[in-house]
Image (tube, rainbow, N blue to C red):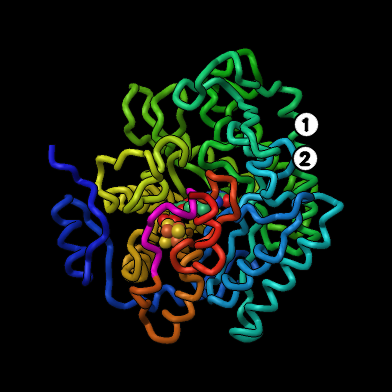
Amino acid sequence: MIPRHEPFAFTSKAELLQKAQELGIKLPLMDSISTLFKAISLGEKKMPNRLAVQPMEGFDANQDGSPNELTFRRYRRYAEGGSGLIWFEATSVVPKGRSNPRQLMINAQNLDSFKLLVEKTRQCGYQAFGNSHSIFLVLQLTHSGRFSRPEGKPRPQVAVFNPYLDKEKENVYILSDAELDRLQDIYVEAALLAQEAGFDAVDIKACHGYLLNELLAAHARKSSKYGESFENRIRLIKEVIKRIKDEVSNIDMAVRLSAYDGIPFPYSFGVTSDGSLNIDLKEPKSLIRRLLKHGCSLFNITIGNPFLNPCFGRPFDRPLPGAMLPEEHPLEGVARLIKITGELQREFRDVLFVGTGYSWLRHFFPHVGAAVIKREEASLIGLGRSSLAYPDAPKELMNTGNMDPNKVCITCSRCTELMRGGRVSGCVIRDKEIYGWEYKKLQ
Ligand SMILES: Cc1cc2nc3c(=O)[nH]c(=O)nc-3n(C[C@H](O)[C@H](O)[C@H](O)COP(=O)(O)O)c2cc1C
Ligand code: SF4
């Protein structure tokens, strides 16, 4: 079989479209990108444009979970870059659920540092673009579950044993129902703190295999109110959203959801139950419907598990060292993300959905993103690695209509390598002075 995977090598939109056609993909794409700069409202708040920074962990927090100077720098660069929404990175709700000793963590003791982070981020936006440029700020709350490393070594706490992700059944710590009950209170407390810090919204993270996402797929968790049936599997996230609505005022609720995790049944969510990897969005749609009923108003759609099938959620040119190149073409990965998000956006027309997976498209992403929004297949275009590499791309697009191909993310996976190596993470290629050095230390 001829390998389909190829690195990005397009010099024009026409070449990109030609490749899409060869692969049998109908890629939305248009010349005008003006749609990206139309404001959009969520309740009474107005986002100045359709470009969103995706949550990207930097592993540069202080020991107590508060942001340090690199964290402040990252959010200053995003705010000055012009995005209308900034989705702050995974922030742990408990010490044991941290993915790294330097993951952000919010608590009553470090609340003032988060207040300052919010204030400075907002100020940067106003200073750069004027007083009408109110960036919408979302804080992602998380428990890392299977991927917890609070002291730097793996300390997994899981909902259920998963043979695709766990090596030995005996060494897996399964959280009890009582521990999961207690987590409800912890999430509500964290949402209260996020509201006090000044965030516009909290995201109850349910993606990429972390605890609340894992629970959605806990078919094999027996004799538990958090396992087997759909009602049980969605219980924790549903209860958390319900309680935040009742107990925290003046904050919007969001969920970053892996709508498809690409793992065979019965260890999966958004996958058919026939043992294949086919997509089935029935349950994700039911979950979204339920969460909307309880007051959630913003969804950020992603897919896959970065530890098992990273090509699904973040299409790349170069895999992590030692990993195989995926069989599929990265454009097929991009198209899958667009298709899944589009199906959900079309089902819930009045709800805001952020799309994921645009960085691989480099300087052509605005043309695809604009077409996706025009077709009402997403409300905002989310940028992860592109925001690390080229945080001021939105500003340049606003001012000149173009991006500089020499400044784009080259999807080389080195930022992920830094994370996996437990180091502070950022763009090794375009932010060399800091992260190039970090990368050298890793070698
Ligand atoms: C270094 C790094 C850190 C990330 N941190 C987070 C995170 O904190 N929360 C999250 O939901 N996704 C996280 N992601 C996933 C991104 O938000 C995004 O979904 C992914 O990179 C695909 O989007 P892109 O093609 O624009 O990069 C991270 C990805 C990378 C590479
Ligand atoms: S290191 Fe930089 S160029 Fe490479 S994938 Fe990460 S953001 Fe992109």
Residue 173 visible here: yes
Q: Main secondary structure of the magenta part?
A: loop
Quick check: is 243 in the magenta stretch?
no
Q: Between residues 227 and 396, which one lies in front from this camera angle? A: 396
Which label is found at residue 186? 2
| Circle 1: residue type | Arg
Q: Is residue 176 above or below residue 25?
A: above
In three-dimensional space, the C-alpha distance between marks 2 and 1, rounded to whole angstroms, equals 7 Å
Q: Is residue 243 above or below residue 425?
A: above
Instruction: Read off the magenta span.
Output: 408-417
Q: Residue beneath label 1, please?
A: 182
Q: Position of residue 327 (x, y in %)?
A: 25, 40
Residue at disc 1, secondary structure:
helix
- Total numbered labels: 2
Residue 438, horizontal then vertical, whole percent = 55, 57
Q: Residues within 10 Å of mark 2 (few under 14, many from 20)?
A: some
Q: Position of residue 367 (x, y in %)?
A: 32, 70
| Residue at image coords 17%, 66% | 15
Q: Residue at x 63, y 24 (%)?
A: 226
Q: Quadrant of residue 233 in the image?
A: top right
Q: Amino acid at mark 2?
A: Ile
Badge 1 crowding class, 10 Å Cα cut-off, few under 14, some 14 to 19, many 20 or more, is: few
